[in-house]
Amino acid sequence: MFADAIVITKNLFTGLDDTAQPGAFAIQGERIMAVGSEADMMTYAQCSTRIIDAGEAFVCPGLHDSHLHFFHSALYASPLAMRYCGTSEQDCVAALAPLAARRPEGSWLLCQGWRNAHWNPSTLPTKHSLDAVYPNQPVAMYSGDAHTLWLNSYALQQLDIRNDSPDPEGGSYERDEKGELTGLVHEAAAMALMPRIVESFTPDELASAYRALINRCVAHGITSICDMSLMALPGLDFVRDDIFAELERRNDLNIRVHMFPTLLEDTSRLTRMQESYTEGKMRACGFKQFFDGVSSQHTAWVKEPYTNALSEHDCGRPTIDPNKMRELVMKAQRMGQPVRVHAIGDEAIHVILDIFEDAREAAGPLPQGKHHCIEHLENFQPADIARLAQLDVVAAVQPMHITLDPGAPEADLGPQRVPYMWPFRTLLDTGATLAFGTDSPVVDIDPRAGLFTAVTRQFLPSQQPEEGWLPTERITQAEALRAYTLGSTRACGREDELGTIEPGKLADFVIWDTNLISCEPEAILDATVQATYLGGRCVYQGK
């Protein structure tokens, strides 16, 4: 047997241990056929074999973002919309001017990223500031945590939301003391409005936005993603397999896509997707559901009231009745399908672990290689940390979430609960699998920031505190990189094909100019991808 290509490097990180050593691997077709020394691999060479000599460069498996929302990430990074955090309510309104200038008259102005906790003053915005500048054009400002919409009066009219409109299940329309809409729409209510807001974008515009984001992914060494449902409502999950399929038909899909539509009583969508995508770069791997909101808005479900409670018994609440969640998970378990559940608050995590445990006892374990996952897991009841490994549940976490609101955990949860925030070291020590991602567009897709944060527990861009926030929960650079590769493949059930450099696996790998496991942590932030390969084919070549 001869190789189509042989990769040689002085720094090969296979992901099977914590080292990067001189080595090589041979590729035949889309897969790795052998791994070993340069001399051993050259025995597979013939005159047509490509020799990829990376020299001193660092070669590792392709990175895998285990949790992002591709539609929204592509949209907000495109000319169709914009991303902006802002320094104040008025600053965010003013920042819309360039978008308004390039969009057709009367079209929606769509922006994502505002975080009032970062503003001065930090009060929540209202429709009135938008109305003053855009009285006759609909404006939708999606929050940085993707759980709240800030709308102007014209948008409320277009969406037929009135002062007496009933709150949808799992969400709310915020009103002032007089019962008038403020323009803020929360949780499922906000999510349900997005399809109507984005329906004006054409298929070609969306395909162009998808191509641009795919190009950014491979430029950052990302070869695989998990595209997660963003809504817990029928037909509103934004997992756009139609766009991905069209790109694959045109040979424009240069990443592997793993799709997780919403878990509903009607499970036929996943079934149809799994029947349709059995080859190529697309797979439908399981279900997604939501169990709570976010701590910053006090919608994450916690056992004890928030320290800075907004009302009596301010504990957040589940976004779906726990009994209903139990029914849905039990149905998926009987189908042999994994479920990935958004659970941020400690009570949401505790209850979903109970449900996973009961489902396993009632219907038996999932098929080999498939795993339930909990997404985000920001705060634990201490005894629950070890339960993830015991129940074979993957912790799908986003290290950059640590940096989003410095000081907020202390204000929201108090000193008793803060030590159990994002406990990466403890999770690994108890045997759990970490699967790293970004939750883009909540944070950017760039994996370097996530690797740095997991290793240092420092906030960006300040790189403070010097010793790290909760420094005992720091992990090593090799562990962080493994969480971004092998760990993420476990979250989508493809550990047998992806995540390490070893015989039989798909030849998805990245060549970096920096040794990501031995460099100083701050050097990770400046590391550059020299080339990205998917199935042995170069899909990105650096300058």
Image: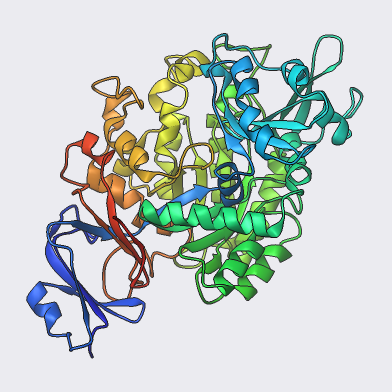
| Quadrant in which residue 197 is drawn | top right
Task: Using the image, determine if residue 273 lies above or below residue 304.
Answer: below
Name the residue rendered at 76%, 52% in the picture. 234
| Quadrant in which residue 156 is drawn | top right
Residue 211, visible in the rendered structure: yes
Q: Position of residue 395 (x, y in %)?
A: 44, 45
Task: Using the image, determine if residue 350 lies above or below residue 154.
Answer: below
Q: Pick the residue in front: 330 or 298.
A: 298
Q: Position of residue 74 (x, y in %)?
A: 56, 49
Q: Pick the residue in front: 238 or 387.
A: 238
Name the residue rendered at 45%, 32% in the picture. 401
Residue 293, visible in the rendered structure: no
Q: Position of residue 328 (x, y in %)?
A: 69, 52
In screen coordinates, is 42 left or right of 504?
left
- Assign the C terminus to one quadrant of the image: bottom left
Q: Residue furthest right?
A: 164
Q: Residue furthest left?
A: 39
Q: Residue furthest bottom?
A: 1
Name the residue rendered at 33%, 71% in the picture. 507
| Quadrant in which residue 51 is drawn | bottom left
Q: Pick the residue in front: 345 or 69.
A: 69
> How many labels sit on residues?
0
In screen coordinates, is 179 left or right of 311?
right
Coloured how? rainbow
Q: Position of residue 176 (x, y in %)?
A: 80, 13
